[in-house]
Structure formats: C-alpha cells, structure tokens
Image: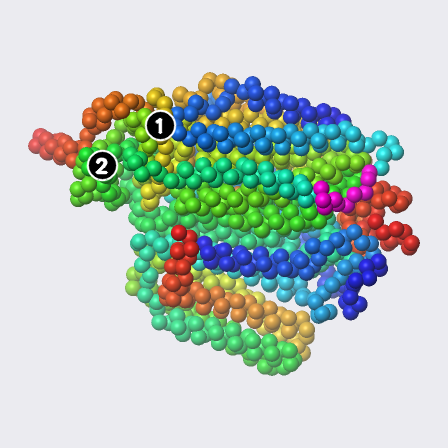
C-alpha cells in the first residue's frame, strides 16, 4: 500500500522538483538552439512516458494488493496488446530520433564561409591560433615544439608565419559569424567545453578534430575542459569573449604573429647571451 | 572493425538460428506434460558437454582474434606503420602446424577405429610438431630482435609480437590439454568413447588454431592489405 | 503427453546422472574452501563481491565529501579524489556487479533452476573463483604500492592513464591492468560453465522456453560477457605493453609537461573503440540478470504469471544482439568520424523498444494480480522506478545531438547510477531477501528489510534525481572542485551538500541489511522448503538448504513452465514445475 503512495509521491516530487529547480541550462549563446529544442521535446515525450508508467503501476499496486480471498487472473500473454505497445513505443522513438538526426546533420556540416581558428590544449591550459592575412593556418607537429614554439608550428611553412598566436587563454570571437574550431592536443585528451554554446568536442593528440558554431550573444564565457586529463583537469580554464566585429578587429590587430614571436624570442636570447 | 562485424554477424546468425530451432518462436511453454517439446535433428546423438564447451570457447577465442585483427587494420592506417620483414622460418612453421593438425586428425580416425597404437603415435607426432612450431616462433622472434625490430620501435613490430604471442599462448594451453589426453591414452587398455571425444576435441582446437594462424600469417605478410583497404573504403 | 506434435523417434534425456560424473568433496577444505560445488562457489563469489563493494561504497563517500566540502577534508587532495573515483567505478561495475550477478547468482541459481546437479565443469568453476579472488587482491594491493592506485578514471583512457599527470602512474595502472586481465581470464572460465550448463544440463522436460527468466537473463548476460570481455582484454594487454615496453599501440607522439615522449603514431581512439566494445555490453551484462531476477520476483510475489513470457525472452535476445553494436554512443564527441553518429544513434534508440516492452510487461504483470508487499517485492518495484527513470535519460544520451551538451556532465553520472548502479543494486537486495531462505533455511527479518528498503530506495532516488539538473546546468563530471565558475550559482554547492548528506545516510543504513543478514542466520524464523510458494524448480529441492548434488536420488522432471500461478481450476495458487499433471485436469 504505502509503496503505491510512495510512487505517486515520487512522480509528484520529480515534477515539482523539475518546475521549482533553480538549476537550468545556461542561457544559450550560439546558434545551437535546435539542440535545446530537441532536448525539450525529449523531455516531454519521455516525461509523459515516465509519469504514465509509474502512475499506472501505482494504480495496479493499490487496486490489486493482496486481500484475503483474492486470486490473480491467469493471462500468459496478449499478443495484440504487446504489438500495439511496441508500435507506439517505436513511433515515440522515431519522434525523438528524427529531429535529433537532422540537427546532427547540421552539426557535422560546417558552413563554407566559416572562419577557421584553432584551439590547442595542453596539461592544463588553453591557447589559440588565428589565421593571419592569408586566411590560412600553417601546418604543425609536436616535433617542432620547443621553448620558443610551444604550439609546434612548422617553422618552414610560409602559411604559418603570419598566424596569430594567443597564449593568454583568452579567445575573442566576432558575433554572428560561423566559426570552425580546429582542436589539437599536445599531450592527452581534452575537451573544448563552453556550456553556453552547447557544442563540445574532444581534443585528441595525434589528430585534429573540429566542430563549429555561430556566436549569437555578446559576453564573456568560461572555457572548461570536459575530458579528464589528469589532476589539474578542473583548473584547465580559458575565457571566450564574444564581441562586435569592430572590437574583435581591434583585439586581433594587437596579437603577435608567429614570425614576430620567434623574432622577439630570438632577440631576447641574443640579449641574454650578450650579457 | 569490419572483421569484427563479420565475426559478430556470424555468431549472431548461428545463435538465432539455433534458438529458433529450439522453439523460442513457438509457445510450447504453455503445454503441460512430461516432455512438451523435445525435438532434435534426426534423433542424432546430442553433443557432449565438452564439445559444446569447446565450441563456446572457440567463439570467445575467435572474438579475441577478430578484435586483434580489427585493431591491426585500424592501427595500420597510421603513416608511421612499417611492417617488419617476415622471417623465412615462418613458412616452415606454417608447414609444421599444418602437419600437427593433420597428425591429430589421423589420431581421430584411428581412435574411431579403436586403433590404440596408431592413436599414440599420431598424438605424439602432433605434439612434437606443435612444439617445434613454438620453437620456430621463438626463433622468428629472435631473428627480428637481432635485426633490431623492437616492439617499441614500430607498432607493426609490436603487433607482430602480440599476434604471434597470443596465438602461441593458445597453442601452449592446447598442448597442456593434449598432454593430458596422451597421458590418458597411454594408461588406457583400449580406446574408450571418452578418449575418442578427448582426441576429437584436441583435433578441433588444433584446426581452429591452424585456421587462425593462416589468417594471421596472411595479415602479417601483407596478403590481407587488400582486405584492409576494402574495410577502409567501407568505413569512409 | 498433451503435445501430439512431438516426433516419436526422440528419446527424452535420462532422468539420472551416473554417479561417477558427480564430484564429491572428501575433506573440509575441499568442501568449503577449494570447493567445486557451485553453491559454495556462489557464496564465495558473492561474499568477495560484497566485500569489495563495501570498499567501493566507502570510496563513494570520499568522492561525495570532497564534492560537498571542497578542501575542507584534510586527507582528500586531487590525487586521492581521482584514485577514489577510479577505484569506486571500476570495483562497482566489474568486481562487484558483474561478479555477484554471474558468479554469485549464476552459480547458485542456474543448476537449481534448470534441474542440474551442478555446473558441468566444476573444477573450472572453482578455478574461476580463485582467479577472481586473486584479481581483486591484485587490485586492492595497489593501495600499498608507491603512488597508490591509479587515478585514470574507470575508462582508463590513454594517453593520460599512463602518463605522469595521473596519480598511480607508477604501479597503480599496471596493477589495474593486470587485475583486469586476470578477472577476464577467471570470468571466461566461469562464463563457459554458465553457458554450457544451461545448454547441456537441463533436466528432463526443461525446454528452453520453460526456463525461468532469471536463467534466461543470466544465460544471455554470460554469452554477451564472453563476447565482450575480449574487447577489454585486448585493450588492457595493449595498454600494458604501451606502459611497460614502450610500444605505441594507443600512444601518439606527444610532449608531456614539456618532455618529449618516445611514442609515435598510436591511436587513442582505437582504445576507446575496444574499451566501449566491452563497456556498453557490460551495462547489459549487469542489467540482463537483473531483468531476469526482477521478472521472477514480481511474478512470485504478485502470484501471477509473468505477462508475455515469450516477448520477455525475445526482448532479452534482441537487447543482447543490439547491445553489441551500440558502443559508439559513448564516443559521440570523441573525435571519431562524425558519420558514425547516425548509425550509433539509430541502434541505441532501437534498443529502447525491446527494453520498453520489458517494462510494460512487468507492469502489466501487476494487472489483475494478487500483490503481496514482501520485502523482495518492494525492492523489485523500486527497481522498476529507478530503471524507468534511468532508461528515459538514456534516450537523451543516445540521441547523438542531445548528448553533445550533456556528455561528460553530472547528467551522465546521474543517468548511469540510476540505470546500472541503483537499479541492479536494488535487485541484488531483493534477490538476497528472496533466496536467503533457500540458501540458509531461515527467513530474513521482514521489518528490518522494509526499513532497509525505504531508506535505500528513497535515499538513492534523492541522491541521483537532482544530480541530473546539475548536469543540465553544465557542471562537468570528474571535477574534484568546481572552483569559481561564472555559470554555476552558489545554490549548486548547497545541493551538493544535501546530496552528500543523503549519500552518507544511505551508506550507513546498509548496516541494517548486514545486521539482518547475519542475525537471521541464527535467529531467523525457519523457512521450510518453499516459503514464498513459488513454482520454479529451485524451491522444490528435497532438502533446504539444497544438499550436495541438489536433488537427492532422482533428478526432477519438469511438466510445465515456471509461471503456473493462479491457474484456473488448480487447488493451490501455484503449480510447481515438477508436479505431475493430474489426469483429466485441463491444461492451462
Ligand atoms: C550510494 C551509492 C553511490 C554513490 C553515492 C556514488 C557516487 C558517485 C560519485 C559522486 C561519482 C563521481 C562522479 C564524478 O565523476 O564527478 C561516481 C562515479 C562512478 N560511479 Fe558511483 N556511486 C554509488 C554507487 C555506484 C554503483 C552501484 C555503481 C555501479 C555501476 C557506480 C558506478 C560508478 C562509475 C562507473 C563511476 C564513474 C567513475 C569514473 O568517472 O571514472 N556507483 N559515483
Ligand atoms: Cu581535462
Ligand atoms: Cu552504452
């Protein structure tokens, strides 16, 4: 008996918690509103299923509890009922899956005009690279990594000379322009994760992965790492600043290119050895 | 991955066909009576537990080797992949293992004819050739190591040692079972049914290991590259 | 015989097993320590699994304490935290749940339920336990090595798991891999037994479709485990070689903390494929036995046949087959070819259909039933609630695009704890309350059992339900401290404290269960042979607890399915499987 009541209470409590909970998804700041919509749809469909199943069970528990003299019915199966339930469930699953797959299709098709940038993860910090005037990123390899070339850019690749290196963990992006983020790790798995843009993707050493999004809201967002990468994992933070096109240009022109950084390093070295 | 897929489809088909034959689609469960539904193909003798056990074990071992093969092909895609030269002794080894398999099959025929002497010789030949195979494998390892193809220097070398090593471990396990069978045969007056079964199980296991070795060898000397290429095309 | 379609040329299997085939213990040691009797092995397995399970439970308190009071507890630092998370997860999934369902319940119930005298390969069965024990000892011993156990996360993803940024990279990771390899070897021996016993040792009249669903569940789980564990085996062996010999199976060229490593070209994603090829089926290896047991608990205590037995069997088979091809849903954001996302999303959501059908059939079994609210029944009902809850959040995570924001957050943690943590654990408790009388001959205390149920069920729900919302908010998992994070409100910390307090309370409440378990051994009410008036074979043994060889002189003969409850016209509300039909009685 009390279990029937408990089940009603569990359902009621869960719904109440859902309504009253102050913990909700962060305000979205990218074009991936569809993801939120699909999740909302999933919540409605599955939530209805949960409530229906548990309440029906609670009713059975109340109605068919043992009382002296009761005898259960003998009912091995009911193929028609089972077939119907199967069909209804299949339809519900298709309702969830179809929009999900459509949105996934968008998620993996990067727009042609997307601006390409690169995020590099290392235990335990973020750095970034933006293409220079030629609009192309130069090649890279862990072999080239040394103290003056922490991202491992290929020194011989002309495309890479004008790349802008951002070592400060702070990435700026212009609002309203699709960005394709190339992801590269120098040591272990990391994951580029900004809750407000919904999308995330692993950084895998040895390969370059990617994902894309369009920033839609000006503001500052925290970049976290969402793939366990050792004891410093929670401290691996960065900042993403979404700003107007003009602000973004100002910021960009202030960044150092690969060539400049090597020159300044070299001159610093020379000074150091002259002393 | 497609190696795995093929293997899995094979296992699933066998399992589902068997289940259907056992009546999972029908509803004999609702009938009452001593033997509500006992159907066996043609009244043939039911397989013994040992045989079924071996079949299940071969499925597990098959799964293990398919996974290794899948890993081999996936890793083989990387640009650093460089197969080591194949020691010539492997051809001899292949011949030895095949001979071992044949010997055990001869033992099975002899056991069925209750020819105890013949069983003993055949088992002995089988065991010796299998042991020679193992020694040959060690020889191949030494040859590669002397040429400085270390496991750590290239993943292809590592796979060479890993695949041959896992295969050899299975064969060593088989040799233990074979030794026990030989022991039983030696002590026995005549060839009993249980003994015949033991010999048969050994022979089946040997054929399986030979089969695995042939596929593995083909992979190692690169005959299976075409297959790997097909997999890759299927995947992309 | 009522079935005219049976071909006449078929001889029924013998009702006698020749005595020579049976193993006999001759001394105390061979009877209780190095025993080959499946029932003793079952107790050994279960005892070991529960013992390490308690260790894992204590570790979960360490995790919870750190999450609620970051920095306030002196002995918990990042290393200890990650080591605790790793050991907790690995022990719970592999060394506790897998071992107790297959090694514990499988060993005890399979022979009894199919009417066999023992497992078919008793010696191998014994070896299986001892190898398992050694595996757990190797794992636990990592606490006593420099550097302690590994803190790589239970997924052990390379490169990080064998590099210096991870606690326990010295010995912990090696011991973990060796222990897993041993576990798999031991499990394979046991698994062969479970499968072959079901295939070969069924008694006369016990067709496949007359087996209790418990046997179906454990059988299919064993088959799946036999096919899935090689994935983990290969992954562990190769990772071990990467760690010890410096091979590059999984390790690409990398620079770790400023130091260039010698690895080159390896593929971390290959490891993930191999790991999840095992890892996902593992979920069902734990779930299928629970499904089976729950079906039997509900049927017995609701005095009604399980509804749609055939559908239940087909669903188990369908789930078993499908769950071998869904592993990619753990890798949607792993950087694998995104086109796989379509395939794995479809297969994953397809599994929801047979799973849902099982849930419907459990619930429909309650319709027109005669429900006794015994402790085992309560636990079975608790399972239904947590399993349905965890199952529907699975639809979020399986639907590839919805998984993108949720993966690697506390939503995932809440989901898998509901579905494969809490739900199976409730079943384990229910099963122990249910079969305890058969194992010991005494009943457990119902009142204590109910108290235990209420605290555990409501408590566990209260721990993990709210956790979903922290995940939706975006809080990542495996963060040993959240620190200052703009999007996390202060109230999240409060919720974490509440969860921790409940978790500690639920944890301590388990002592009620253990008190009950040991007290009833001596003071429990005598149970008789069949206290629940159940129809399946294990309750019809001539002795309770079942003696050596289970069945006395004659093996039982089975005349009907195990769910003949409340059959119209029958004098009692259950007909044992081995009760000969009364002539002229209407067949149900
Ligand atoms: C009351 C009991 C339990 C509590 C309070 C608990 C709590 C936790 C917590 C707090 C975490 C860490 C989440 C994070 O990464 O931030 C965790 C991880 C985990 N737990 Fe539990 N847990 C319990 C029982 C179980 C059970 C029964 C299972 C069996 C399936 C289980 C399996 C896992 C796994 C696989 C992980 C992931 C470990 C990893 O991230 O590497 N837990 N648990
Ligand atoms: Cu990280
Ligand atoms: Cu999964």
Is residue C228 positioned above or below A45 on the image? below
**Which image quarter is the N terminus of chain C in?**
bottom right
Give the percent coordinates (x, y) of residue B167. 47, 63
Magenta part mainly helix, strand or loop?
A: loop
Query: Dot 2 lies on which element?
Result: loop
Q: Residue B67 carries which label?
A: none
Query: Dot 1 lies on which element?
Result: loop
Residue at the spot 25% in from the left edge and 30% down from the top edge: A166
Q: What color scheme is it?
A: rainbow
Queried whether the magenta region covers residue A75, the answer comes back as yes
Residue at the spot 80% in from the left edge and 54% down from the top edge: B31
Q: Which of marks 2 and 1 is nearer the N terminus?
A: 2
Is residue C239 positioned above or below B97 on the image? above
Is residue C425 positioned above or below C13 on the image? above
**Is residue C356 visible in the rendered structure shown here?**
no
- Label 1 marks a residue whose chain is A
Residue at the spot 8% in from the left edge and 32% down from the top edge: A274
Quarter holding residue A70: top right
The stretch of residues the image draws in magenta is A72-81
* Residue farthest along the right direction in this orientation: C584
Tell me: C367 left or right of C229: right
**Residue position marked by numbered label 2 in the rendering:** A135
**Residue position marked by numbered label 1 in the rendering:** A215
Queried whether the magenta region covers residue A18, the answer comes back as no
**How far apart are the alpha carbons under marks 2 and 1?**
20 Å
């Amino acid at each position: 008996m009390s279990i029937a009541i408990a089940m009603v209470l569990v359902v009621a409590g869960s719904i109440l918690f859902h309504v009253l909970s102050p913990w909700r998804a962060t305000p979205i700041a990218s074009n991936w509103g569809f993801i939120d919509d699909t999740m909302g749809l999933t919540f409605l469909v599955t939530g209805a299923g949960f409530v229906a199943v548990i309440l029906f069970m609670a009713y059975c528990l109340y109605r068919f509890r043992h009382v002296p003299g009761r005898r259960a019915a003998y009912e091995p199966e009911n193929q028609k009922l089972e077939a119907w339930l199967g069909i209804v469930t299949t339809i519900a699953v298709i309702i969830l899956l179809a929009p999900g797959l459509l949105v996934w299709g968008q998620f993996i098709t990067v727009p042609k005009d997307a601006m390409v940038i690169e995020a590099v993860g290392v235990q335990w910090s973020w750095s970034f690279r933006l293409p220079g005037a030629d609009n192309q990123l130069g090649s890279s390899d862990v072999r080239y990594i040394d103290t003056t070339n922490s991202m491992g850019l290929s020194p011989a690749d002309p495309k890479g000379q004008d790349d802008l290196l951002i070592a400060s963990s702070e990435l700026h992006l212009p609002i309203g322009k699709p960005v394709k983020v190339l992801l590269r790790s120098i040591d272990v798995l990391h994951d580029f994760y900004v809750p407000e843009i919904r999308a995330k993707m692993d950084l895998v050493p040895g390969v370059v992965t990617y994902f894309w999004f369009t920033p839609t809201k000006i503001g500052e967002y925290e970049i976290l790492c969402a793939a366990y990468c050792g004891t410093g994992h929670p401290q691996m933070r960065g900042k993403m600043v979404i700003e107007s096109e003009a602000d973004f240009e100002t910021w960009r022109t202030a960044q150092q290119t690969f060539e400049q950084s090597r020159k300044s390093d070299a001159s610093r070295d020379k000074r150091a050895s002259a002393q | 991955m497609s190696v795995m897929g093929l293997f899995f489809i094979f296992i699933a088909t066998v399992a589902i066909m068997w289940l259907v034959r056992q009546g999972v689609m029908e509803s004999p469960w609702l009938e009452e009576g001593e033997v509500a539904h006992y159907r066996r193909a043609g009244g043939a003798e039911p397989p013994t537990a040992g045989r079924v056990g071996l079949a299940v074990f071969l499925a597990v071992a098959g799964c293990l080797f398919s996974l290794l093969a899948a890993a081999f092909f996936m890793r083989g895609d990387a640009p650093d992949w460089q197969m080591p030269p194949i020691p010539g002794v492997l051809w001899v080894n292949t011949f030895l293992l095949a001979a071992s398999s044949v010997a055990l099959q001869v033992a099975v025929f002899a056991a069925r004819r209750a020819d105890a002497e013949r069983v003993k010789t055949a088992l002995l030949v089988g065991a010796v050739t299998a042991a020679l195979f193992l020694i040959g494998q060690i020889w191949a390892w030494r040859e590669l190591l002397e040429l400085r193809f270390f496991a750590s220097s290239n993943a292809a070398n590592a796979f060479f040692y890993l695949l041959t090593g896992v295969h050899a471990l299975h064969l060593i396990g088989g040799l233990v079972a074979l030794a026990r069978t030989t022991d039983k045969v030696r002590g026995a007056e005549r060839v009993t049914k249980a003994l015949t079964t033991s010999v048969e199980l050994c022979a089946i296991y040997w054929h399986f290991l030979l089969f695995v070795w042939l596929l593995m060898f083909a992979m190692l000397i690169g005959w299976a590259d075409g297959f790997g290429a097909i997999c890759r095309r299927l995947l992309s | 015989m009522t079935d005219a379609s049976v071909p006449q040329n078929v001889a029924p299997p013998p009702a006698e097993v020749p005595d020579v085939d049976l193993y006999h213990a001759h001394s105390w040691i061979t009877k209780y320590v190095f025993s080959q009797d499946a029932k003793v092995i079952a107790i050994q397995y279960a005892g070991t699994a529960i013992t390490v399970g308690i260790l894992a439970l204590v570790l979960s308190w360490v995790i919870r304490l750190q999450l609620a009071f970051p920095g306030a507890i002196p002995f918990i630092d990042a290393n200890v935290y990650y080591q605790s998370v790793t050991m907790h997860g690995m022990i719970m999934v592999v060394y506790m749940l897998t071992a107790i369902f297959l090694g514990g319940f499988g060993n005890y119930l399979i022979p009894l339920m199919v009417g066999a005298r023992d497992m078919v390969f008793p010696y191998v069965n014994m070896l299986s336990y001892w190898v398992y024990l050694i595996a757990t000892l190797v794992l636990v011993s990592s606490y006593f090595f420099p550097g302690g156990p590994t803190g790589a996360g239970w997924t052990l993803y390379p490169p990080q798991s064998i590099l210096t940024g991870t606690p326990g990279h010295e010995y912990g990771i090696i011991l973990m891999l060796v222990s897993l390899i041993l576990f798999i070897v031991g499990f394979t021996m046991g698994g062969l037994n479970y499968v072959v016993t079901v295939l070969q040792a069924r008694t006369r009249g016990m067709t496949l479709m007359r087996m209790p669903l418990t046997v179906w569940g454990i059988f299919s789980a064993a088959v799946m485990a036999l096919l899935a564990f090689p994935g983990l085996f290969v992954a562990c062996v190769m990772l071990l070689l990467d760690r010890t010999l410096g091979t590059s199976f999984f390790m690409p060229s990398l620079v770790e903390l400023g130091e260039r490593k010698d690895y080159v070209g390896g593929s971390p994603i290959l490891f993930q494929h191999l790991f999840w090829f095992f890892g996902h089926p593992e979920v069902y290896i734990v779930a299928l036995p629970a499904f089976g047991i729950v079906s039997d608990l509900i049927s017995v205590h609701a005095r009604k046949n399980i509804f749609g037995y055939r559908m239940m069997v087909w669903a188990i088979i369908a789930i078993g087959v499908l769950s071998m091809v869904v592993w990619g849903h753990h890798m949607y954001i792993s950087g694998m070819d995104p086109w796989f996302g379509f395939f794995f999303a479809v297969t994953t959501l397809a599994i929801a259909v047979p799973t849902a059908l099982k849930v419907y059939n459990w619930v429909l079994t309650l319709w027109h039933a005669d429900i006794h609210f015994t402790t085992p029944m309560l636990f079975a009902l608790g399972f239904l609630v947590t399993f349905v809850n965890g199952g529907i959040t699975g639809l979020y995570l399986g639907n590839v695009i919805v998984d993108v924001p949720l993966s690697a957050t506390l939503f995932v943690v809440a989901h898998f704890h509901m579905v494969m943590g809490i739900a199976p654990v409730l079943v384990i408790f229910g099963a122990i309350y249910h079969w305890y009388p058969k194992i010991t001959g005494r009943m457990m205390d119902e009142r204590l059992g109910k108290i235990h149920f209420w605290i555990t069920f409501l408590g566990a729900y209260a721990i993990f339900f709210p956790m979903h919302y922290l995940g939706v908010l975006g809080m990542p998992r495996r963060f040993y401290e959240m620190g200052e994070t703009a999007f996390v409100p202060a109230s999240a910390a409060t919720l974490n404290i509440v969860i921790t307090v409940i978790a500690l309370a639920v944890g301590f409440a388990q002592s009620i269960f253990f008190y009950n378990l040991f007290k009833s051994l001596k003071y429990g009410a005598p149970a008789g042979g069949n206290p629940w008036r159940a129809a399946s074979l294990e309750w019809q043994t001539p002795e309770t607890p079942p003696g050596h060889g289970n069945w006395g002189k004659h093996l039982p003969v089975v005349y009907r399915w195990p769910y003949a409850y409340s059959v119209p016209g029958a004098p009692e509300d259950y007909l044992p499987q081995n009760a000969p039909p009364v002539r002229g009685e209407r067949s149900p």
